[in-house]
Image (tube, rainbow, N blue to C red):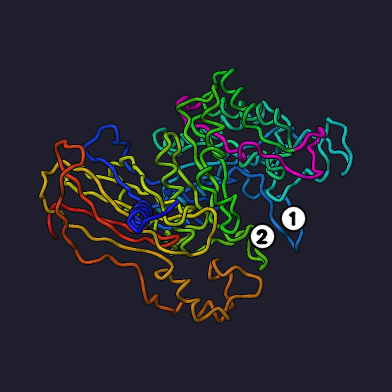
Amino acid sequence: MKITLLSFLCFMWMTLTNAQVKLSTDFTSEAKRNLPIHNVWNTANRISPRNGSTIRSGLKMNLVRMIGGIIKVVNGVPQKDLDFDPCLYDSINNVYVYRWEPLIERLDRILNSQTEILQIALDQPPWAFQHGYTFIPNGTRDNIHFRENERMSKYGNSLPPADKQAYHDFIKALMAKLVETYGEEKVLSWRFRVGSEIETPEHWYGTKQDFIEHFANTESAVRSVLPNAMVGLHTREHGFLKIGKMLNYKGEPFASFIEDLIDYNYTNNIKCDFWGISDYIKIGDSSSRDMRDKYTKSFAPLIDNPKWNANTTIDLMEYSTVTTMNGADGRGVLITCESTHRDIVELVLSNTFYKNYGLKFIYRWSNGIGSEDPDGIKELKTMLGMIRYETNISGNPKTSTNELDAIFAKNDNQNEYDVLIYNYNSNSINYIESEPVNVSFIIDFPVGTTLYYRSKSYGKENNKLQNFLVNNLNFVKSGFDNKGAPNRILTAEGYKAYKNYENPHPPIFTEWKSVITTERSDGKPGSEVSVSTKIGSFAFEKFEFRSNFF
């Protein structure tokens, strides 16, 4: 077939025209209007804190392993730590003895540091509740007794209470003490979580049925004192299966409890106010960072279950964007990612939570005093309280695997419009050619109205670590990923140099510009705002549109 010059030029024009993504919304449409943008990243985890808050201002705290059953290491040997247990067993008089002072002292230090408590995990039971167990030798199994090596896990006491009624009474007494000390209103503002990643062997050596009974026993004890208390749980991901030879004391593999827990709660009319799962996105693992499947794999199996309670919210109760879960420097397991990949992963994850009703909070590890949010989340937090509108995506990216999206938000009272666009790619973490993008939205203003806007771009050229490494790769320790946290991947000399390094290209807003609204393509009242930009790989751009010049 003969191809004329005109047809070739038409083909090329169509190709170039289609190789652009348009991100748009209609701020006049009630169908596009959603809930206000809430702070997804409002909570920090802390494990058995003893000296008050160690998190930065403005965050709430999730308190893990607060009711005892923890371990301490003496001369390199793990031992039971009874110093903080609010319940002890008196073997002479054969009674459980409550002592609340260690717990109340720790809670007081947190509250006095002006940190708000979101949640208290009722996870490892105090050591007293191992009373009554008979342990059999390691490597044996009789389907009745726990093994010697299960007396103590790396987390502490990971056994179900031997005396369920005694544990029920303890939780009732605990709740009564909290109400007596802090008042009913304050305690009702806290959530009570049963378990931590409960299918993980070291967190729970019992069976699925053991935990179902434990959850029901704990939930009823909490609500016997405070009927309106918020109670939930924390499991592993749906479909979890511990691969290998490790079996529980009844010879069963450690696997997901989710389906049976949902069924039990439904059948027995047990209200589960919130449900936690965990996720660690490993930036070098394409399956781990496949954000398009995140809802389908992580959340849909719960929400789509016909017995799921629609009023139950879902949190990611353990989260981090990491380069590895097996740090080789002996200073902790995971190493966080601090290249721009993290910024965009966490924006995509935030948007996933906004798009799906019922997804609530993400508890990111770290968040210590002096730390900061990634730049993308900083910009997102300036939009809190604004009304989010659904994004329409049309056109095709130049790189087919690029995933471009936006968060559109409006302040109803002040005619303020914010747009946060980003470019993600789950297929490759390489930085490739920038994408041309058109950002547009419909407003109530008449055609010809002048709006003013500014924007802030952020890409690898604005990231402090990536700028530092341009001329300092020699400071990266052998075997470490150069996208990781500087205090972990750099030599001592390199980290000192990094701390003294001033980022030459920090992200900043442009000067204010003007744009004139044009006629809507559908002929309806109002007008359209349209601007064009380019956005790089693993980058974002924040636009702020205002009706008045500043």
Query: With 476 as the anchor, is 447 left or right in this view?
Result: left
Residue 41 lies within the magenta run: no
Q: Quadrant of residue 19?
A: bottom left
What residue is at 59 percent from the left and 26 percent from the top?
A: 262
Along the viewing direction, whichever of 218 and 106 lies nearer the viewer:
218
Percent x, y of residue 266? 56, 20
Q: Quadrant of residue 121?
A: top right
Q: Which residue is mark 2?
A: 326
Q: Quadrant of residue 32?
A: top left
User: In the rendering, which numbered label is found on residue 78?
Assistant: 1
Along the viewing direction, whichever of 269 and 32 lies nearer the viewer:
32
Percent x, y of residue 161? 70, 33
Q: Amino acid at mark 2?
A: Asn
Residue found farthest to the front: 2
Percent x, y of residue 254? 73, 38
Extent of the magenta region: 224-253
What residue is at 43 percent from the left and 42 percent from the top?
A: 353
Question: Is the residue 139 above or below the residue 379 in the image?
Answer: above
Cα distance, mark 1 to mark 2? 21 Å
Percent x, y of residue 349? 46, 48
Which mark is nearer the camera, 1 or 2?
2
What residue is at 28 percent from the left and 42 percent from the top?
A: 25
What residue is at 36 percent from the left and 49 percent from the top?
A: 406
Question: Is the residue 404 above or below the residue 190 in the image?
Answer: below
Disc with the residue nearer the chain's start (1 vs 2): 1
